Structures are given as C-alpha cells and as structure tokens.
Amino acid sequence: MSELPRIHILSDQVARKIAAGEVIERPQSVVRELLDNSLDAGASEIEVHLESGGNDLVRVVDNGVGMGVDDLERCYLPHATSKIRTDADLLHVRTLGFRGEALGSIAAVSRLTVTSLPSTESSLPHRIEVHGGALINSGPAAGDRGTSVEVRSLFYNIPARKRFLKRPQAESSLVRSVFVDKALAHPEVSFRLFSESELRLYLPGADQVGRIAAAFPGQSQPALLQELHGSGDGFRFTIVAGEPSGARRDRKHLQVFVNRRRIREYALVQAVEYAYRDYLHGGLFPVAYLFLEVDPELVDFNVHPAKREARFRNLPVIHRRIVDTFASHLRAFNRSLPPDLPVSPTLTGLQTHPVHIQQNHTSGAPPTRWSAADANLRTPAPRYGPAYDLSRSFQVPDEHETIGTTGVRYLGQIFGLFLVVERADRLYLVDQHAAHERIIYDRLKDGSAAQEMLFPVQFDLDPELGSALEEHQTELAQLGVTVRRTGSEAWDLTGVPAAVSVDAGELIEMIRELCARPADFSKELYASMSCRAAVKDGDVVSPATALAIISGALALSNARCPHGRPIWTEYSREDLMRQVGRL
Ligand code: ADP
Ligand code: MG
C-alpha cells in the first residue's frame, strides 16, 4: 500500500504572502519602497504621512509622472514593472526599483489604495483599492496630478508578522532613518515627514552640504563640511568631508551611497576610514559622506532583497581614487613646520651614517661626532632612573650634547614626558613617546628586513586564527616578521624586525590579537609594534636619543602619532612675550 504523498504545492496566495514578507518587514520597508517609486517617477516634492509609526497608515504623496488607469490596474500585481523588460535590461538599470515586487508585496499584506493622475493629463485622478492582494474597487477619485499611495493595516492578514511590529515610536524612528537616507541621496528633492498629522521634518531642496546640515540639525555644521569631487573610468563621486576635529565615537556620520542608494559596503567605508587614519585616534570616526555614481554596467544591486549590498567590477580603482581625493583635502590639516624652517630628514641618515653635530654660535664646545648607534633609535632607551620621579623631572643635559643638526637646541626633559627644544625663535614641547612611536611607525611602513632568530619561538594558534595568519604572512614578512607553520595549530616565530626592538613574546601576543580581527592587519601591527618599541612616558632618555627623536619629530610632514594625536606643541617668542605682557 503506497502512502499518501506528504509534499504539496503551496497556493499562490500563501506563496505570495511568504515572498512579500521578504521585501516588506515593517513600515520602514514600506516607506523605503514607496519613496523609491516616487523618486523613480521624477518627483520634485514628496510627503510621507504616518499614523502609529506606520503600523496603521503610511501615505506617500508625490508630484511625479503619475499613472493612467491601465497602469494603475496593473501596478499592484506581482512582477509588474515599467522599468525593465528583458533580463538584458538588468545591466543598464538607472532607476531605484526594477523588480516589480514592491507594490505587489505591499498589496499582499495590507489594505492598499493608489490614487494617480499622469502629469500630462487634466482629467480626474483614478483610484484602485486592493485588500490582501485582491482588487476591491477601481474608479475616479478627487486629487492632484502625481501619485498618492496609502498603506493601511499592515500585516492585518498575517498575525504572526504583525506581532513583530514594535511600538509606534520605535517604528516611526526607523521610518525617519530611511526617510533621511533617501533625502540625503536626493538633495534636490523637497521632502516632508508628517506623523499624526504634524510636520516632523521638512527638508527643502538644497545642495549636498545644505541637505546634510538640514537633516542633522545641530550635529554637522556646514562650515566644517567640505564638498569634494572625483571621477574615473565609469564612475564619479561627491564627497562631503568633515574636519578631523569633528570626529565622533560612532560611525553614524560615515555614510556611503552608491547610485543614490545607501549601502553598507565595507570596502568603501574602510576606504574613508583609511583616508582619515592619520588624523583620528583609534575609536574615533570621521564625519564623511560618500556619494558614488557607478556606471550601471559595473555594479550589480541584484544581490540583496533590500538592495543594501552591491557588487562592483572596478572596486580597487574606485577605492584608490576615493582615498586620494580625501588625502589631498586632509593634508590641509597636517601639523607640520612652517615652510620657512627647513629641516633635513635626519632619521634615515641617523641609522646608517654618522651624524655631525653643528657647532652653534651659542656653544663654545668643539664639534663632536657621534654615530647612529649612540642615537639609539633601534632600541628603547635605557632607563636611567626610576620611571617618572619628580625630583628628576627636569633633566638638564650637558652643554656639548645639546645641539642637534639644523640648529636644534635640546634643553631637557620635563614631567618625564616632554622634550623641551629651542629652535629659531620657537620653543617646542615634544611628546617623547608619541614622537618616537611615529618615527618607528614610519620606518616600519617603509618595510624592514627580518632578523632571523637563533632559536625560533614556538606558539600555538587556533586553526581559524591560523588561516588569518597565513593570509597575512607576506605582509608580515615585509615588516620583518617571519613565521612558519609547523603543525595544524603549531607555529614558529622565526624572524623579528631588524628595524625595531620588540620582545618575541610581545610580538606573538600582537599577532594573536590581530589575527582575531584581521581588518587593517599590517597598519595595526605597525601601530602596536611602534607603541611597544617606543620610549615610554616616564622613561628618562639620553640626550642623544632625545636629539634623534626631536629632529625626527620636527622633520615629519604630519606630526601626529599613529593614533592621530599631535606630537608636539610650539610657542613662538612673540607668544611668550605676549603672555608676560611685553608685547
Ligand atoms: P518597480 O519599482 O520595481 O518597478 P513596484 O512594484 O515598486 O516595482 O512598482 C510597479 C510599477 O508601478 C512601477 O514600475 C511604476 O511603473 C509604477 N509606479 C509605482 N509607484 C509609482 C509612483 N509613485 N508614480 C508613478 N508610477 C509608479
Ligand atoms: Mg519600486
């Protein structure tokens, strides 16, 4: 006896409800889809009205091209679209929508009314009413040109889904965020958001900077936002870049739009963060908006139901152009010496060649020669005394040790932290740790040879972390760190960087940490290595080391430590004179 088959085919109606749930999750997705449609219809003015955060009602009204009766009676059907015809058209999509799924999905899970009059006609508008996917009414109605879409009682016919809707306030704030996303990408369009019949946000047509400022009142000052442009083969972009000083502790204002859709493309977010890396401490994120327009043939949005992700063909080129564009703008925020005070790039010289100490007219001492080894930048300075002892906080060096190249006079160390320097009518306080760290960091960035270890140090690593490490092995080798896999979880550290001195155990700890979060692996590794190899706060440094650090620091083109903090402060003679009332 054969059993009854257990498999049956779902009815169209059930299948449609399920599919609709993928596109429409909550009022926010309704608003997203309806705004896309209004924008695709070329509207210059759009209103969104909510009741109960959209749970009871979402109404979107636009002054776009509108629909005639035939289109109205079709628009809510599954796979109904005017935007593409064949699959070949998918390659050239220039509209926000193209799948013909939105109205169909909304219609399946709500009570939908669409009223529309084509912008070219002067008759009465037409209205259709659709409940749970079925056409209930179709006839003339009152209204203006353009389209008004009303979505009532969302999920009234799917109680399981309705239960997941949040309180009106929570839903309405989700709506607001998608509303703002759309408005940011279409600054020329006027947007109004009403909730319970009250106007909550009005964004009149503006330029890009004006739109951002209006969308986040009190959060981004237009004066601190700079609009930049760039382009390349098949793409162009507008960037609105905030000053480093306006950085935030979150990524709220680090936003990426591609072809006017806000997307969460990690590579592009990372490009922006990378561009700001030398200007911001760890944990701070820039205010920066990227609006990228890519030739539709080079990008595919058909990878995510809500089009939040995309695939690009020429991502590396785009990435580079973006970083370059930011970089040339951000250079204005570099902290470096004024051009009338040239300094020689002493450090590379220090390592391999002897350095001459110039005889300075204030010093009667004979010229002295000392070598790179004395400058001791390869290794942390020996600790002369207890870490930060107040009684020793001002270390006065011997006269003959104090004059560096290019007329730098080292006066001593204060607070176990600052190197005090006089040069050409200026007083500098150099943060010894930050400066040393930056110098080592730059040196590592230029690559380092590996110093092979006599006895490799064994360590173990989870297979997962191990494969991350394998991926970064070449990068590591360029830094002078060589490792070898000796078993499924067993590794040897076989070489350490010749350019800096770091403890093998510490190095292994850093590798372990970085394998667990491999983004920006080598940058993080330079930063950790430089931080650990640099002299610490409270270290008493020898005058030779101090001078080497000072001339290195003053020669930097961007005098910030790898975390983005400034390395020194300076006071001119006039500054000081003014402070004591002499000027
Ligand atoms: P898609 O946007 O992917 O084409 P939708 O289901 O969102 O699919 O809309 C179906 C069709 O209805 C659109 O292709 C368009 O022709 C028409 N339409 C929807 N909304 C509007 C509107 N606000 N103004 C004019 N036409 C609209
Ligand atoms: Mg659509």
Image (tube, helix red, strand yellow):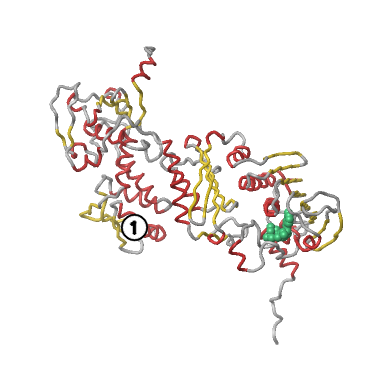
Q: Residue 230 vs residue 350: left or right?
A: right
Give the residue displayed 38% in from the left and 48% down from the top: 523
Which quadrant holds residue 333?
top left
Question: Residue 216 versus residue 166: which sits nearer the camera?
Answer: 216
Quarter of the rendering occupied by the N terminus: bottom right
Say above or below: 551 vs 107. above
Quarter of the rendering occupied by the C terminus: top left
Q: Residues within 10 Å of mark 1 (few under 14, many from 20)?
A: some
Spot occupied by residue 114 in the image (x, y as percentages of width and height): 79, 55
Q: Is residue 102 visible?
A: no
Question: Residue 491 versus residue 35: which sits nearer the camera?
Answer: 35
Residue type indicated by callout 1: Gln
Spot occupied by residue 169 in the image (x, y as percentages of width and height): 70, 43
Say above or below: 179 vs 111. above
Spot occupied by residue 257 in the image (x, y as percentages of width and height): 56, 50
Q: Is residue 582 visible?
A: yes
Residue pushed farthest bottom?
Answer: 1
Q: Residue 105 vs residue 463: left or right?
A: right
Residue pushed farthest top?
Answer: 582
Question: Residue 530 versus residue 272: which sits nearer the camera?
Answer: 272
At numbered mark 1, what does the secondary structure look like: helix, strand or loop? helix
Which quadrant holds residue 280?
top left
Which quadrant holds residue 531?
top left
Question: Residue 497 versus residue 513: which sits nearer the camera?
Answer: 497
Q: Which residue is mark 1?
A: 473
Spot occupied by residue 227 in the image (x, y as percentages of width and height): 53, 41
Give the residue displayed 74% in from the left and 39% down from the top: 199
